[in-house]
Each structure stands twice: as C-alpha cells, then as structure tokens.
Image (spheres, grey):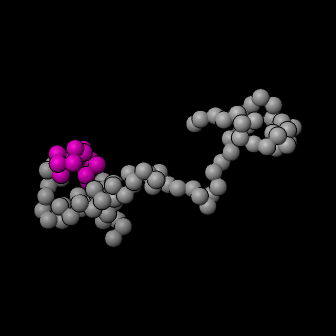
C-alpha cells in the first residue's frame, strides 16, 4: 500500500480537522463498499481461472484422466480433483 501525504491531496481545512484526531500517524481510508471488487476482477485473473476450470471439467467429462489434466494444466492432481468436486457440489 502506498502512503500519500494528506497535505498534497486534501484541502487544508480537512487536514486540520484530521489533525484533531490523529497527529503524525497513519490513517487507513477503506474503499467504498459499492465500488469494492473481488480478487482478480480488475485484472481478469478471476475470469481466466473460471475459463480454465470449465475447460478442465469439459475434458474430464469427455474422459480425460486426472493425471493427464494435471500434466496439461501444470496443476497437482489434488487441485484437479478439487476443481471437479467443487463443480459436482455446485450442480
């Protein structure tokens, strides 16, 4: 997390008001809940993993083995089984 000096960002009146509560310390300002995004949504990683998992499930459904899929996707057999079992629970 990058720290920003309040004097460079906020109006002087607001800086003075904040100084009434905290002097020389760090203040965390949380993001607005309405603008909150889950991990990987902005970068596209989340959707990439969903697509990969759909491919794994399709190949498994067409007869590919867990061992083959682990090698193809560079994942452990445990992870491949986890993808398969999580999907079976969500059906």
Most common SS among magenta residues: helix
Q: Is residue 85 visible?
A: no
- Residue at image position (25%, 52%) is 80
In the displayed structure, 64 sits above or below 4; it is below
Q: Is residue 20 magenta?
A: no
The percent coordinates of residue 69 (x first, y second) are 18, 52
Q: Indicate the quadrant containing the C terminus: top left, top right, bottom left or bottom right.
A: bottom left
- Residue segment shown in magenta: 69-81
Q: Quadrant of residue 53?
A: bottom left
Q: Quadrant of residue 63?
A: bottom left
Q: In which quarter of the image is residue 76?
A: top left
Query: Count the marks: how many?
Result: 0
Q: In this view, does 44 lie to the left or right of 27?
A: left
Q: Is residue 19 left or right of residue 9?
A: right
Instruction: Name the residue nearer the viewer: 80 or 53.
Output: 53
The percent coordinates of residue 41 (x first, y second) are 45, 55
- Residue at image position (17%, 48%) is 72
Instruction: Name the residue nearer the viewer: 24 or 14.
Output: 14
The percent coordinates of residue 64 (x first, y second) are 13, 58
Q: Indicate the quadrant containing the N terminus: top left, top right, bottom left or bottom right.
A: top right
- Residue at image position (81%, 31%) is 23
């Amino acid at each position: 997390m990058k720290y920003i000096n309040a004097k460079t960002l906020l109006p002087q009146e607001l800086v003075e008001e904040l100084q009434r509560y905290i002097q020389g310390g760090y203040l965390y300002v949380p993001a607005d809940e309405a603008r909150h995004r889950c991990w990987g949504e902005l970068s596209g990683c989340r959707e990439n993993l969903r697509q990969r998992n759909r491919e794994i499930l399709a190949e498994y459904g067409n007869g590919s083995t867990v061992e083959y899929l682990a090698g193809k996707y560079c994942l452990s057999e445990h992870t491949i089984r986890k993808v398969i079992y999580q999907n079976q629970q969500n059906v």
